[in-house]
Image (tube, rainbow, N blue to C red):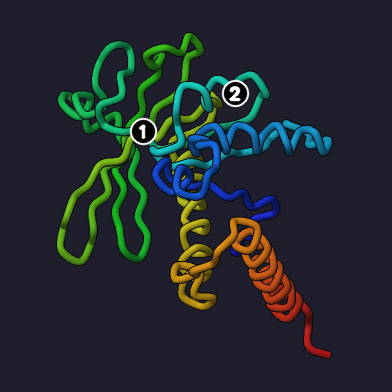
Amino acid sequence: GFFFIPLIPRKCFRKVVAKKLGLVYVPKTTVAINLLDTWFSYGLNGKMVFILADSWYTSKKLIKKCIELNLILIGCLKRNRLLNGKRMENYRCGLRRNQKVEKSDDKYLYRLYHRIGTLSGITNPITVLLSQRIRLSDGRKSWRYILCTKMDMSVLKILDWYKKRWAVETFHQIWKAVFGTKNWRLQSVCGIQNLSTITVMAIGFSVHLHVCLLYTSPS
């Protein structure tokens, strides 16, 4: 929808910070996988659950975990990842005009292509969306490579779902700008986690009020 609220926030520290705090370092991909296990321990039904991730999270372990749990993973891939033994960026050569689908919004034109195959180290086939994004204001071009574990999903649906991931980034921008979390200087990890929980609850409450006002007809 229009809003994003983290329901189960998890702390994740860089290796050097974890060592300084005397904590066991846990990679963020492992944190993400553990979070999925937590969700399912609460009785989450995996049917039509979408996992949206940027290229830092789409590891082999996460992809395999999503396939195992029958989750629909849509995530960005780095350009050096191998699909059918070939680097993603090399698929840009030889693309045919009659294979593309185009979509535009207020800022960008998207030229969409797709390929089906297997990633290195993963036996299950996936769909990869090759998206060329052209900024309308100056013609600047950029490429994104987006995997989808649901084989029958169209390129337009894959793009629409992946664009919803930006709500996560928007939340963190607000979280840092409004609550000043980027500048927190606390002595304990517990204090950071408690304040994080309080601020997330505050944002969630404000979003709830906003939704109520947005969808409630005037009396």
Question: In the image shown, does 126 or 18 lie closer to the viewer?
Answer: 18
The disc placed on residue 65 is 2
Q: Residue at x 64, y 58 (%)?
A: 193
Q: Which residue is identified by label 1? A: 77
The nearer-to-camera label among 2 and 1 is 2
The amino acid on which the numbered mark 2 sits, given as a three-letter code, is Lys
Q: Residue at x 48, y 41 (%)?
A: 53
Which residue is farthest top? Answer: 123
Pointer 1 local density, CA inside 10 Å: few below 14, some 14–19, many at least 20 = many
Seen in the picture, residue 3 relative to 96 is either above or below; the reply is below
Seen in the picture, residue 67 relative to 56 is either above or below; the reply is above
- Mark 2: secondary structure: helix
Q: Residue at x 51, y 49 (%)?
A: 21
Seen in the picture, residue 21 relative to 26 is either above or below; the reply is below
Position of residue 23 measured from the top left corner of the image (x, y, whole percent): 55, 42
Position of residue 188 measured from the top left corner of the image (x, y, whole percent): 59, 60
The disc placed on residue 165 is none
Which residue is farthest bottom? Answer: 219
Q: Residue at x 30, y 24 (%)?
A: 81
Position of residue 166 measured from the top left corner of the image (x, y, whole percent): 46, 56
Rendering quarter of residue 208: bottom right
Rendering quarter of residue 146: top left
Relative to residue 184, is residue 7 drawn left or right?
A: right
Looking at the image, is mark 2 or mark 1 earlier in the sequence? Answer: 2
